[in-house]
Every structure is written in structure tokens, then in C-alpha cells.
Image (cartoon, rainbow, N blue to C red):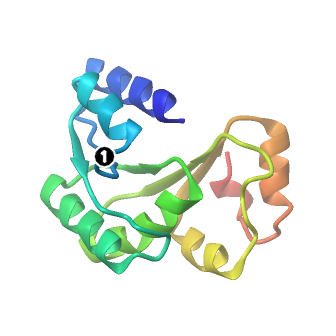
Amino acid sequence: GEKWLARLAACWRNRGHQPLILCQPGTEMETLVRTSGLDYRSVVMRHDVSVPGVLGIARVLREFQPHLVLCCNERAFRLTAPATRLAGSPPLVYRNGLTATFKNRSLNRWLFRWAARMVVISEPLREEMASCGWIPPNRLQ
């Protein structure tokens, strides 16, 4: 997932965009984006409902003012969804690339209503997520 995100950010950069990656300090992701020459910010995100993590992400979003926010896993989304609300940020997109990983739980049902789009990599994964019953079909692509 980290390599995919770094390649995607490099492609966006090559097309004239200014991607910014948020990652935990001291992680492989931080090393990967630093060595790739990508712009990044380190934010301490200790767990899924980390208030300091949400506030740190919101601070970066207010400073950077992105046109789009992309989250590549549920944990990132659970931290970023409330942060985008605090920062007044643009559309929030969730990308899922793994089957049998999306959790149909009340916290997700509440937070994922803020997703402008939910992007999946295959039809079986789209069907799996649609089977939750609460994801509007027009937001699941």
C-alpha cells in the first residue's frame, strides 16, 4: 500500500499537482516518501481515535489547503474524516484495495457518510462493500 501511494503521488506530481503525504514519524512510509523526494508531513497518530492525531491532521490540512484528501485504509480514514471537518477541507475519498478488510461497524457507518467517494479496485470488492447495506451506490466506484 505504501509503495502504491508513493507511486501515485509521484504520478500526480509529474502531472503538475502538489501531493502531500501524511505519515507517522519514524515509519517505513516516512522513509519511502523522503527518499522518493515527495512532500510529506509527519503526524503522530497513536490509534484510530487519537485526538492529538486528528488535531495534527487538521492543522496540516488547514496549512496545505488541498483540493482533495485521499485515505488508503480505514484507520487513516477514521482519523482524517473528523480532521477534514475541523479544517473545512475539500472532498474526502476512501480507497480500498483489499477484500475482507472493511469493517461494517457503527463508527464506520457514522464516519464514512463524509466520504465523497469510495474507490475500490475490483467488482468483487465493490460488491462486498455494497453488501454492508449503508453505502450509497453512487459513492462506491
Q: Residue at x 28, y 18 (%)?
A: 14
Q: Tell me: residue 47, above or below residue 28.
A: below
Residue 20: give x, y in percent of width and height: 26, 41
Total number of numbered discs in the rendering: 1
Q: Is residue 105 left or right of residue 88?
A: right
Q: Position of residue 57 (x, y in %)?
A: 29, 64
Quadrant position of the C terminus in the picture: top right
In the picture, residue 59 is in which quadrant?
bottom left
Question: Residue pushed farthest top?
Answer: 14
Q: Residue furthest front?
A: 26
**Which of the 4 quarters of the picture holds residue 105?**
bottom right
Q: Is residue 15 above or below residue 25?
A: above
Mark 1 neighbour class, 10 Å CA radius: few under 14, some 14 to 19, many 20 or more: few
Classify 125 as above or below 46. above
At which x and y percent is residue 33? Answer: 30, 31
Determine the secondary structure under disc 1.
loop
Left or right of 77 in this view: 130:
right
Q: Is residue 133 left or right of residue 59?
A: right
* Image coordinates for residue 93, horizontal then vertical, percent: 49, 52
Which residue is painted at 50% across and 28% down in the image? 4
The residue located at (78%, 45%) in the rendering is: 99
Q: Which one is in front, 15 or 63?
A: 63
Q: Nearer the viewer, residue 136 or 66?
A: 66
Q: Quadrant of the N terminus?
A: top right
Label 1 sits on residue: 26
Residue displayed at 35% across by 74% down: 85
Residue nearest the observer in this picture, 68 or 73: 73
> Disc 1 marks which amino acid?
Gly
